Image: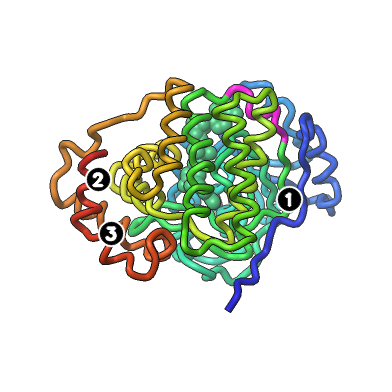
Amino acid sequence: MYRNFRIVPNIIFGRGSFNQLDDVLKDRRVGADSYMVFVVDDVFTGKGLEGRIPLRGKDLLLWVNVDDEPKTKYIDELVARIRAYSPVTPAGIIGIGGGSAMDIAKAVSLMLNNPGSSADYQGWDLIQNPAVYHVAVPTLSGTGAEISRTCILTGPEKKLGINSDYTLFDQILLDPELLAGVPKNQWFYTGMDCFIHDVESLHGTFINEFSKAYGEKSRDLCRQVFIEDSPEKDDKLMMASYFGGMSIAYSQVGACHALSYGLSFVLGIHHGIGCCIAFDQLEDIYPEGVREFRQMMEKHDIPLPRNLTKDLDSASLEKMVTTALGLVPLWENCLGPDWANIMTRDRAMELYRRM
Ligand code: NAD
Ligand code: ZN
C-alpha cells in the first residue's frame, strides 16, 4: 500500500509577505461574530512584530510560552481559554513562532473541534473531525513543522504527536524577514534539525526518488547556509526547512531522532539541541553527515552540552533506552528490518552514556 498524503494547499513565500496576512484572512471573516485567534510566541511581546499583527474586531491575541516544549495539559488550557472567551468557534487560528508555537496552533485548532483532552489523540489518525482553519507563520526555521502532518506533544504517558491529515496547516506564510533576531545558537540547533532530517531521510532504507528530490535539495541549501554563509541564508533556510519536511513526509527520520526523544522525555532537552547532542555520537551510522555537522559547528563556534547523563541513575537511563527503541519505524528506516539485532539495548545505552 502506498501512502496517500496531504500537503499544505496554500503557500506564500517572500520577504515582507507578512504584510499580506490581513488580506489572506479577509475571506475567512464571515459574519459579525467571526474572529481570529493569533497564537503568538511570547518572545515577541513588545517587539516590532506585535504591532504588525493584523488584529481586527473581536480577534484574540493569545501569547504562548515555549520555555518548555508543548504539553497536552497546556493545549487543553489554551482551548479552555478560547472557549471561555467566546461561545463561537473561531474562524481561524494563526500560529506565529518556531516549531513549538506552530505545533501549539495545530493542536489548538484540532482540539476546538474534537472532544476530550489532546492526550487522547496522541498517535496516528485518531482525530475524527477536521480542525478549525489554521495558518502558520514561522519565525524560526528547521523543524519542518510548517509542512508536517503532526504536532508533537508531551503527555502524561508519552511524547508523541497528533498525526493526522487534519493536522496539516491550511495556509503557510513564509517570510524570511521574520528570522531576524533569532539567537545564534538557537538558529543553529533548529537549522541542524533540518540538516539531520535530510541526512536521516537520505541515508535510510525507506528512501525513494520523491524523498530524495526534496532531501538532496534541502541538504544542499543547508550547506549554503551553514558552510558557505550565503547572503540569502534566511531565505534558503526557510526553504530548506520546508523541503526537509517534505522529504521525511514520504520516508522517515532515524537513529538521531529516536535517541533525541529519550533525551527529551527524561531530561526535558529541547528538540533541536537534543538532535545535535545525539547526532554527534553517530558517526558510525552517518559518517559523512556527522563530519559536515562538526564542520558547521566549528565554523559557527557553537557549544554542545556534554556529560548530560553522567549523574543519571540506571532507571532513568533504561527509560531513555526504552523510549528510543520504542520508535520502531525510525530504526527500521535507519538499519533495516534486522535493526533490533544491530541496535541492541546495550549499544543504545552506551551511546547515551557518551552524551
Ligand atoms: P521553539 O519554537 O521551541 O523556539 C526556540 C526558542 O526560540 C524559543 O525561546 C522561542 O521563543 C525563540 N524564538 C523563536 N522565533 C524567534 C525569533 N524570530 N526571534 C527570537 N527568538 C525566537 O524552537 P524550534 O526548534 O523551532 O521548535 C522545536 C519544537 O518543534 C519542539 O517542540 C519539537 O517537538 C517541535 N517539532 C515539531 C515538528 C513537527 O513536524 N511538528 C518537527 C520537529 C520538531
Ligand atoms: Zn526533527
Horizontal and vertical percent position of residue 307? 23, 33
Q: In the rendered view, tell whether residue 63 sits above or below residue 210.
A: above
* Residue 290 screen position, x and y as percent: 41, 39
Front one among 195 and 103: 195
Residue 21 % position (x, y): 78, 39
Mark 2 crowd level (few <14, some 14–19, many ≥20, 10 Å Cα): many
Taking the spot 49% from the left edge, 29% from the top edge, the residue there is: 186
Residue sitting at 68 percent across and 52 percent down?
A: 134
Circles 2, 1 touching at the beta carbon (< 8 Å): no
Q: In this view, does 278 lie to the left or right of 35?
A: left
Viewer-nearest residue: 293 or 126: 293
As rendered, which of 206 and 328 lies closer to the eye? 206
Q: Give the range drawn in magenta.
A: 175-181
- Indicate the amino acid at tag 2: Tyr
The answer to if 266 sits in the magenta stretch is no
**What amino acid type should be assigned to the residue bearing mark 3?**
Met
The disc labelled 1 sits on which kind of residue?
Answer: Gln
Q: Is residue 303 left or right of residue 136?
A: left
Element type at marker 3?
A: loop
| Alpha carbons under labels 2 and 3: distance apart | 12 Å
The span from disc 2 to disc 1 (Cα, nearest Å) is 39 Å
Inspect this view and state whether residue 135 appears. Answer: yes
Q: Which mark is residue 343?
A: 3
Residue at x 17% of width, y 42% of height: 312
Q: Pick whichever of labels 1 and 3 is earlier in the sequence.
A: 1
The C terminus, quarter of image: top left
Residue 230, placed above or below residue 211 = above
Q: Residue 352 carries which label?
A: 2
Furthest residue toward front: 288
| Mark positioned earlier in the residue sequence (2 or 3) | 3
